[in-house]
Amino acid sequence: MAQDFDAIIVGSGAGGGIVAWVLASKGWKVALLEKGRSAYPTLGAPVLRQSLFGNDELRRRRYFGFHDPFIEPRTIVQSAGGLAQQKEFQGLGVTVGGGTVFYDGDSPRVTQLDLRMLSTFGPVPGASMVDWPISYEDLAPHYDEVERLIGVQGAAGADPFAEKRGPYPMPPGRPAKVGTILSKGAKVLGYHPHPMPMANNSIAYRGRPACVDCGFCAMGCPIDAKGSTAVTVIRDALLTGNLTLLPECCVTQVLKTPKGDHATGVEFLDKDGKPSTLNAKHIILAANAIETPRLLLASGIGNSSGLLGKNLMFHMVFAAVGTFEEEIRSYRSRVVAHALADFTVPDGSKDYIRGGYVELGGQIQPVEYGATLPRQVHKALMVSGKFRRKIASVSMMGEDVPQEGNRIELDPKVRDVYGRPVARVTYVRHVHDQTVIDRYMPKLTAIAKAAGATGVMEVDFVKEDGVPESKHLLGTTRMGDDAKLSVTDKWGRLHDIDNVWVADGGVFPTSTAFNPTLTQQALAHRLATYLMNPAGQGKVTP
Amino acid sequence: MPLPAVVGGQVVAMQDPKFLTRRRFLGGALTLVAVPALGACRRGDGAATARDALADAPATSDGHGEIAATPKPIGRWLVPGGTTLSPERYAMLLATMDALIPGDAVSPGATDAHAAWYLDQLLGAFRSQPPRIYAGGPYSGRHGGINAFSSFQPLTRIETLRWRTYLEGSKDASGNAIPEREWNGPVKGLQQHYAEGLDALNAAALKDNGKGLAQIDADAVRTLLDSADETFVQLVYQHAVEGTYGDPVYGGNYQQSGWKAIDYEGDRQPIGYTARQMSHPEEG
């Protein structure tokens, strides 16, 4: 059969964008299918001008370029035999660039400890803890490459708990008051705050300007100072002439041979809603850890282990939000400027393994804030600014231990606007994770108080019944060496099919103590490097 | 992590003796915080408010539309011409939003910010082409650069289907299903939600006060809202907030009155903040 492309990539976010660049830059003909629209009319032109994002909360509230639960609902089951309820759930960007268009840009690396949870700490009852099939050394050169491609600011050596590394592509950006006072408080208590590694330009970098700290990162960067995959690797790949970008194209099936062990292409609905197909030698799925298993389940592919869609993980996100007498205006900054890793190291307790990475900062804009206030106190709180202008937040990324029962399935009834069964999510919080929250919350509160907070709100960012608010979607196509105990191999290839690969957070065997995006990107870079040259075993060659 | 969920998440402990002590911020706050502003609406008569509501009119470029027809007095309110809602319902909407986010001596409220006009613009978004759903990018022009916000973006096929279904519902004028809008079953549109919700509030006002929603004062409206269908009240509240603090290009936040009321700078691109503004926010 004649091939339309060497590779088809489904999803243009963190992982898909990186894979597109590696393959296209080495001469492969690549199609990148994206369900959402493009917000960059000139993305492939010699000069990049004018994104369609703006400092505008309403376009974000109206789901511009975002997962829209009205057209693509998800159903949630929160206990065994419970009712599936239709809800807004863990939305990410649905646009060229995916989640990286709207994320903060937090780009820490993991440590070797994160990849060796089972062998270091032993099993956790009720959890499916495992080691990763790769080591930090396997990832390190890919971290370096990704940081260079998307542009990451940071200070090498500033975090004493991080693995050794070379200099960042650019220095930390300008300090905001929120990070300065919280760092001071953390230092008083003997912790080690450092500039948060961020995919935001602190200086002009590879044709994109420095960030001006407008504070609207969550609405998409209007000046392309954030290193989303759209304005970095996808744009670079388009300029090679080898990438065909297909926005507003929704993949409905991965097509396979009659025997079922080889994929031939994808079926999709084009811009006009017309069913169409494309063929390719390789299919790379990077639609995120909810959407990728949803597509695989709908295609009847990849589930010989029975684990496809299982071990779904987020992160426990919880915070001590300090209220201050003075003006903080934490929105005058990129979202996070400082962090600390002290709690990612075990403290010797027998009740839990450890805590997670801590962000010093966080911000809120007025529509979002006002809309969540009880209407009876709206006016007083809006005008006083107590919880908007005078807050500083210390928040932790608590590890979410993997559980087979937490999973993605296809909903038997509910359909999306494309006529596809929607994802049905089952999630129950593990007692380990709740223990971590209970034990570490006081430590976060102590930091806020040491920074001068006169009051502290302790907040568990949670939906009802323990489902975290985190947007970190991980673990439904876990990688491993044993095909009976994992869905993908150590490169991200499905054990069941020799040419279908996963390049999103689904391959994480455990959730790690860190924001996951940069690690997803390093894994995607490693996958693509191997795919181009299997003999090289994923080694980066100049 | 952005902070929005601070106020939506579950607060597990409050350690501020001056503020809240209850476990849940959302339920607990209601009974514990004194809100002087709520009772002190600055308007003695309806006419002042009505003039504010009318001041919407002038240019099309700032999102406040063109109001050609003669304003119509209804109850305590003057209703501009050219609305998507019927004039009677528009007056009811003004009364409801005014009760939810009142103005006072120091700060404007939802009606001053033209939040009703904002919602009406959303309901009638498809009366313009491109529909007034997504403002353009990247800048408003208020801080340099071009004013791109006022050039609304053409919608994609899916976005058009989405917003038509959301606003108009899944039935045509004769009540027959439009198949492509019923991917997940029948949908009642936002226009109908508002028509029915406002009529229900008005009926309750007639029953309790002997006068319609647009005739009674803000305190009486608030009393009504406390026993009304909270789902609808929340819907109006969300839109009142959006219309008060959202970008002016969508028809609300008139002359940035919502932002001025809460000492907020609004959009900042392309200039952002200076290093000094970041490190010393107390200086203003």
Image (tube, coloured by chain):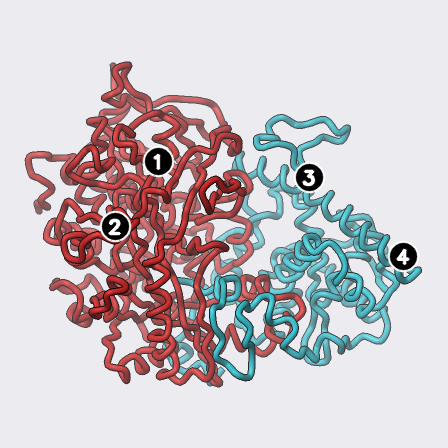
Chain colours: A red, B cyan
Vertical side of B255 occupied by A432: above or below: above
Please determine if labels 2 and 1 lie on a single subunit: yes
Residue holding disc 4: B206
Measure how far apart labels 4 and 2 are at the Cα level.
60 Å
Q: Nearer the viewer, residue B71 or A189?
A: A189
Measure how far apart labels 2 and 3 are at the Cα level.
43 Å
What kind of element bears circle 2?
loop
Residue A120 left/right relative to A366: left
Q: Earlier in the sequence, mark 2 or mark 1?
A: 1
Disc 2 or disc 3, which is closer to the eye? 2
Q: Earlier in the sequence, mark 3 or mark 4?
A: 3
Measure how far apart labels 3 and 4 are at the Cα level.
26 Å
Neighbourhood count class around disc 4 (C-alpha, 10 Å): few under 14, some 14–19, many 20 upward: some
Residue A510: assigned label = 2
Neighbourhood count class around disc 1 (C-alpha, 10 Å): few under 14, some 14–19, many 20 upward: many
Residue A444: assigned label = none
Dots 3, 4 in contact, CB < 8 A: no
Q: Nearer the viewer, residue B39 or A32?
A: B39
Residue holding disc 1: A293
Dots 3, 1 in contact, CB < 8 A: no
Q: Quadrant of the image for the N terminus of chain A? A: top left
Residue holding disc 3: B188
What kind of element bears circle 3?
loop
